[in-house]
Image (cartoon, helix red, strand yellow):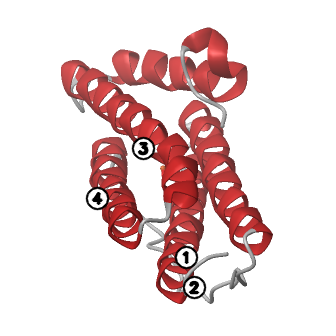
Amino acid sequence: MLSKKIENALNNQIKLEAISSQYYLSMASWAETKGFNGVAAFLFKHSEEERMHMIKLIRFVNERGGHALIPALSAPEKSFSNLNSVFEQILKHEILVSSEINKLVDICLKEKDYTTHNFLQWYVSEQIEEEALARNVLDKLRMIGGENKGGIYFFDRDLGSMGTTSSASGIKTE
Ligand code: OFO
């Protein structure tokens, strides 16, 4: 059985995962309208993964006798100045998510809720990969430089295959 404190903290995390999913969905839609179809495919997939993170939490809270709450969300940012700014924002957001997961883990230890602590380890590892992925993509973009149209063309194409082939390219799907 979850304590009220842990239940509330998990519900906050459910909201954050929902926000992440919407945020990346908005980025995907923006990228598609700009003709970056590969980036869009990558981001649509990323958005789905965040929704899956949210659902995993919802199921856990309910399974442990709590009540997972489906949050209201405000509209995410709808336009972005360029691809660099999109991936900079993703990295910043993932760093925020990691710090929230760490806070959750800390609460579990203080409350001696080892079951939830154990459940959250999946999110801890996931965050390491998500931050690394965002850094990696950003490094590639910085290497290419904003004015290099050929470079951006190949970047978009590569990201598109990452968005559709998952583990073969080292991109996580869950
Ligand atoms: Fe990208 O973060 Fe979920 O957990």
- Give whichever of discs 2 and 4 has the lower sequence position: 2
Q: Using the numbered discs, state the Cα–Cα distance from disc 1 to disc 3 in whole angstroms.
A: 17 Å
The quarter holding residue 102 reads bottom left
- The numbered mark, 2 or 3, whose residue comes first in the sequence reads 2
Of pointers 1 and 3, the one earlier in the residue sequence: 1
Name the residue beneath numbered marker 4: 99
> On screen, 92 above or below 170?
below
Disc 1 is placed on an element classified as: helix
* Circle 2 Cα neighbour tier, 10 Å, few/some/many (<14 / 14–19 / ≥20): few
Which is closer to the viewer, label 2 or label 3?
3
Along the viewing direction, whichever of 159 and 167 lies nearer the viewer: 167
Q: Nearer the viewer, residue 156 or 34?
A: 156
**Mark 2 = which residue?**
73
Quarter of the picture containing the N terminus is bottom right
Pick the front one: 158 or 121 = 121
Which comes before the other along the chain, label 1 or label 2? 1
Instruction: State the mark number for residue 124.
Output: 3
Q: CA distance from mark 1 to mark 2?
A: 8 Å
Which amino acid does the dot numbered 2 rest on?
Leu
The quarter of the displayed image where residue 10 is located: bottom right
| Amino acid at dot 3 | Val
Residue 15: assigned label:
1
Q: Is residue 145 left or right of residue 76?
A: left
Q: Is residue 73 above or below residue 79?
A: below
Of mark 3 and mark 4, the one earlier in the sequence is: 4
